[in-house]
Image (cartoon, grey):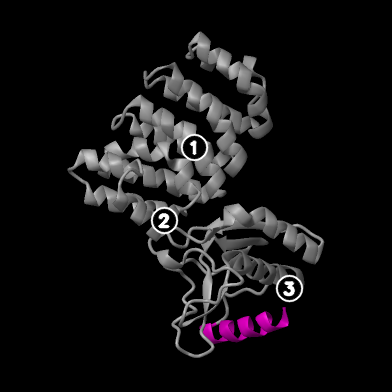
Amino acid sequence: MSINLADYAELLEDLSPHSQAALQANWHEATKVFSPRGLDNYLKGASAIRGLGKGDSLVEAWIVETPQVAKEVGEDVVGDLAAASLSLASRTSGAVIELLLNTAPTAANRLGDAHLFQNYLQFINTLIAQAPRGVRPMLDKLDVLFHQLTLGGLRRWALWGAHAHRTNYEEQIKYFSLDSKESLAMLQKERKGTLLVDVQRRINMYLRALWARDFFMRPTAGDFETREGYRPYIEDYLLHLPDAFDDFILPSPTGGGAGGEGTTSAKSSVASSPLTPPPAGEGDRVSGLELYRATAAHCAAHVVETKVPISAEALNPMQMAVISAIEDARV
């Protein structure tokens, strides 16, 4: 395998002169992102999409956007993106596939993980079967949606709209365009307090200040089916943290509140002012950012202070619980 574009003459022959020019303009960037094997898959993907016969603009969207996706979440997802694009060809227009490719870097950037990006492509495949006319307006609003929702929240928001407007295409388009009151209401319901992707850099700086070293974090989509997140865990020295945290409301000191829920309702999604007392029946509010700091610091302490990994394979649940309690107390 080679990194020289001239060595792929047979694949280049499948492309139009305009697409070849676009590839030459983007080749330098592609060689910085892809390995030789990744470049081979990148070019084969361009040739396969050209074979759909849906125009040069679709091919050029692949050429321009795919390196950005690989830069965000790794080159292993390129095959998944190509397969998703090809599978949609018989069910939607080239314009929708082109929009999927054009917005793929946004999705990759906001998700920040190859596995989550693959789940996103599966979600698009599901949605296009249930609400084909809603996919295009949703992709037009993808940046807005991903700044407020996790992947799980986006999935629930979209599938609710697909079910509610299965046969009313006009309302379906309004829902996915964020032009209806119920669409905005569902968006508020699924909105999370703090997304990891928005605070990850600050958390990295915080951990570096504590330990004078870098740590690697990956988001987990624990709320894919429900609003409950996965518990944080450590695997292969990676800190796996939930992709979002709601503010945590402590129980009221007077005992009248039902706080400590860990998730907030739509009415309480905005933190109270420091000068404003908490609502009646509620205790103090711990922000999502503070939860991330505490969670990441605790996980990092385990990584730093655990000299020899402990295998859980030979332990029963009671032993695991006792060891966990001791290790948590130690760090």
Magenta stretch contains residue 128: no
Magenta stretch contains residue 319: yes
Residue beneath label 1, please?
A: 104
Q: Position of residue 54 (x, y in %)?
A: 37, 20
Q: Earlier in the sequence, mark 2 or mark 3?
A: 2
* Label 1 Cα crowd, 10 Å radius (few <14 / some 14-19 / many 20+): many
Amino acid bearing label 3: Thr
Residue beneath label 3, please?
A: 306
Q: Are marks 2 and 3 in contact (CB under 8 Å)?
A: no
Q: Position of residue 96 (x, y in %)?
A: 37, 30
Give me the residue at 63% from left, 68% from top: 290
Give me the residue at 61% from left, 71% from top: 274
Residue span colored magenta: 316-331
Q: Earlier in the sequence, mark 1 or mark 2?
A: 1
Q: Nearer the viewer, residue 259 or 158?
A: 259
Q: Is 310 placed left or right of 178 in the picture?
A: right
Is disc 1 placed on a helix, strand or loop? helix
Q: Are marks 1 and 3 in contact (CB under 8 Å)?
A: no
- Of the two numbered discs 2 and 3 in the rendering, the one whose residue sits closer to the viewer: 2
Is disc 2 placed on a helix, strand or loop? helix
Residue 153: mark: 2
Q: Earlier in the sequence, mark 1 or mark 3?
A: 1
Q: Position of residue 313 (x, y in %)?
A: 56, 74
C-alpha distance separating marks 1 and 2? 18 Å
